[in-house]
Amino acid sequence: MGSAPRVTALIDTYNHERFIAEAIESVLAQDFPASEMEILVVDDGSTDRTPEIIRGYGDRVRHIRKENGGQASALNVGFAEARGEIVAMLDGDDVWLPHKVQRIVEVFAQHPEAGMVVHPYQYWFSDVNRCSEDPAFIPLAGYLPDLPDAILRFGGVGTCSTAIRRDVALRLLPLPERLEVFADSYFLGAAIFSAPVVCIKEYLTLYRHHGSNLTALGAADLTRLRRSNESFRGAMEETRRWLTENGFLPRKPSAAQLVERMALVEQLQQFALRRPGRLEFFGHLRRCHRLYSPLWSRAYRLFDAIKAGAGFVLGYRGYHAAQRLYRGSLSLPQLRKALLPAQPPEFGPTAAAGRSGSLELP
């Protein structure tokens, strides 16, 4: 089989006949020596032309076909087969930018203590060839469980924007195969408690938006919404179990923060399926306030408390109608930011990371 490659490009795919060739081509186009990288595609039982398209690449791609089982089972097979020291993940409907692998390898070499490298991605609306930045990404890095409030701020990261050392990943496997979707939520949550993270502030992946994204669902698609909610609840339960079994719960407050953050997301998904009463919705808003208030200025805490009260008065539907009007205004959000800044002046990303010994890169 020859010497092991430095990098495994691990592509998981299911019924991506429209997109899988672009995903593979984006890996083949990397400005990184092909002799030092393997491309491993795990086909999770596709029923369209995806297998035929993959086979067309011959020995340039290692193709593993399995029965359909979902994201966790596909990643389990992929990591078991991966030979690279570094495993960089890619979904079969997304694409890498040409310098991604080279940058990741450079950063891992600079930080041998790091177990994972992450970066932001751009949302790619391929039908109109338009991209937009992901506002959820915040460039924090280091051993996140020990950085003040980092677990509350860390976001905008998925499989397509993550690379992990294989030896770190193997300590976390197998992933619970009940997680047909949102296996990455469990995987990344466990990974950040297992090793330090390095953050690259560069867009290195295009995350494609299309009608079949498993985690981008319309409100009218109740069947898929229920499946998504059940899977995310499973990811939350498995994350809590892993944190408990490995001694992080209840010892580390950051572990409790992660579980509560996931619980609030799961509750919001429930609300999309079943409209909450006023008291239940008010309780949700108060839980959000308690969790995230350490990140906010004193003035914004007052503003958010008033918002929670408005949620009780207006109810779930009325609150979101008012929120849409607010966000659609040209002046109100700017006025709020000027009068009631969300973060205290001393708690910008750079200041917080600097106080905590961050591994953040420019």
Image (spheres, helix red, strand yellow):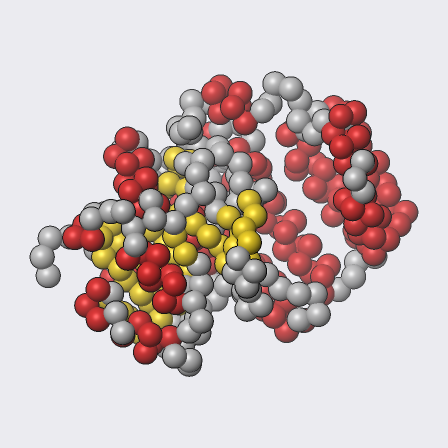
Q: Quadrant of residue 1?
A: bottom left
Q: Tell me, yes or no, if residue 243 can be seen here.
A: no
Q: Would you say 155 lies left or right of 4 here?
A: right
Q: Would you say 14 lies left or right of 138 here?
A: left
In the depicted view, which residue is nearer to us: 95 or 270? 95
Residue 269: percent from left, percent from top: 66, 58
Residue 20: percent from left, percent from top: 39, 67
Quadrant containing the C terminus in the rendered view: top left
Residue at 81% in and 36% down = 332
Residue at 30% in and 31% down = 111
In the depicted view, which residue is nearer to us: 259 or 319? 319
Q: Tell me, yes or no, if residue 270 can be seen here.
A: yes
Q: Would you say 240 lies left or right of 75 here?
A: right
In the depicted view, which residue is nearer to us: 359 or 32? 32
Residue at 44% in and 63% down = 93
The mark tally for this picture is: 0
Residue 38: percent from left, percent from top: 23, 57
Residue 288: percent from left, percent from top: 70, 41
Q: Would you say 173 lies left or right of 61 here?
A: right
For residue 268, above or below residue 360: below
